Amino acid sequence: MSSQFELERKKKLDALVALGVDPYGHRFADAESAAQIREKFAAQGESAEAVAAGRLLAMRKFGKLAFADVVDQTGRIQVCFNRDELGPQFDIFKQLDLGDIVGVAGKLFVTKTGELTILVKKLDVLCKSLLPPPEKWHGLADVEMRYRQRYVDLFANLEVRQTFLKRSRIIAHFRRILDEWGFLEVETPMMQTQYGGAAARPFTTHHNALDLDLFLRISPELYLKRLLVGGLEKVFEINRNFRNEGISTRHNPEFTMMELYQAYADYEDMMAITERLVAGAALEVCGSMTLPFRDLEINYAPPWRRATYAELLQEHAGVAMADEPAVRAKARALGQAEANKDIAVVIQNLFEATVEEKLIQPTFVKDYPAALCPLTRRHPDDPNIALRFEAYVAGMEIANAYTELNDPAVQEANFRQQLKGEVEGETMRILDEDFLTALKQGMPPAGGLGVGIDRVVMLLTASPSIRDVILFPLLRP
RNA sequence: GGGGGAGUAGCUCAAUCGGUAGAGCAACUGCCUUUUAAGCAGUAGGUCUCGGGUUCGAUCCCCGACUCCCCCA
């Protein structure tokens, strides 16, 4: 189907061909970015020659003269199409539409109204656009269209481009710092014959040649720990995890996790790493350690608050974690089902209902009920407590870390406990025999950390939905 | 899975207590050599998400479906 717009544009495309112009352009490698051109003007002043390439996104025509905005990845630069300056090329200009991608070359000058402008001497059509761009003032506002046609969203809405540039720089910052600290970036299987390392439902797939059912990983944890056994002492992976669960403003079925493991470290070290990475990204990428999110001001400057799970439960739910009858009574008072449920699950539900939303400023919640933590080392003074923390910001979990369990006997016992499903809802229903074999070879004591990259990007870019920081979020077709 | 909201021109949005829909931008035709959402005059552009029902008549009311958003589990 062709709209009136498409037909009009095809007419102009044909007219360009008739003028001997290739409407789909060719190599145009000499272009400077809009930002570079501004720097050049600052250094050289008017009359400097400039070459730009980008999408034509606004046009103010005066018959024999026109001003237009050429937008590239770094921003916009005004260009001036003047018939006297362009000569015969003015006929090419007349076949241009908003949305076309052009290359222009000419001298810089400043207009009467004070705007830096390229007076175009040479015009190249690099791509004729056959569809009209969204409205110049409001951009593309329809949320569904923005997600489905992100390619339009990106060129029509500057803030969207900024968000994804920041996402890239945040991840680059993580990589750079981890590299400086001597961490080795590795890749472990996304397709696994057994899924594990977290309590979540997996996606399944099938390998035809092997006639083998496979799972998309819900976590890389059990593979990264095998690398500790192998003698790789500081490793990390930034990659996708897949969880076959609900979708919300904080959950996408595929999401990006940074996991790292450090031999001979513990969860206190992981707290320091978490603070440093997130606060460093805030400062380096966003220019401040204090950033807005929703109607909040979040201060990422280390040290973040450290509080135990039990302290926070006391603070916000008003019950002592060890006082089982009080915990159950409080859960009932909040309308939560608690009968026939393991006390650890009741506690966790109570925590989620009363504590999480209160954790606005960055907070490390440490020392979890051990039953919720089958992969974590127990507290030396209390076997019911696990050396685990989760980091919360704006009521949202952004990181999870352990002093890793490296005792194969305890690990096997924990797995078997999980298999019995006594801690329903938080179970890891797998028994990875090879992982236990690896632990028997001996894994150094270690700290492990997982950071939800999408959520960190949400926070640092003030994006209220995870879909605003994932280029192509999952939508029904 | 439950509750609420939305879907109207290419885009951003109005309107209708049931009588076949408007504006701005974009487009098209003119005029225009310094604009910043340029201006002026004119023209064209609609499966009112889809399918049923009620009605003389449905974009509007009823039922169902689809998609998206928000909240809850």
Image (cartoon, grey):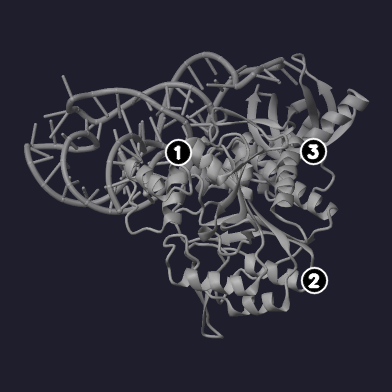
Please state the chain letter of the residue tagged with numbered disc 1 in the rendered image.
A
In this orientation, which residue lies closer to the viewer: A209 or A150?
A209
Q: Amino acid at mark 1?
A: Ala
**Mark 1: secondary structure:** helix
Mark 2 packing: few (<14 Cα in 10 Å), some, or many (20+)? Answer: few
Q: Is residue A208 above or below residue B50?
A: below
Q: Quadrant of the C terminus of chain A?
A: bottom left
Taking the image as shown, residue A391 lies to the left or right of residue A262, namely left
In this orientation, which residue lies closer to the viewer: A103 or A179?
A179
**Does the residue at mark 1 contact the one at mark 3 (Cβ under 8 Å)?**
no
- Residue A98 seen in the current view: no
Who comes first in sequence, dot 1 or dot 3? 3
Taking the image as shown, residue A451 lies to the left or right of residue B58, namely right
How far, Cα to Cα, is label 2 from label 3? 46 Å
Residue at 45 percent of width and 41 percent of height: A319
Q: Amino acid at mark 3?
A: Ser
Residue of label 3: A33
Q: Which mark is residue A317?
A: 1
Q: Which mark is residue A231?
A: 2
**Does the residue at mark 2 contact the one at mark 1 (Cβ under 8 Å)?**
no
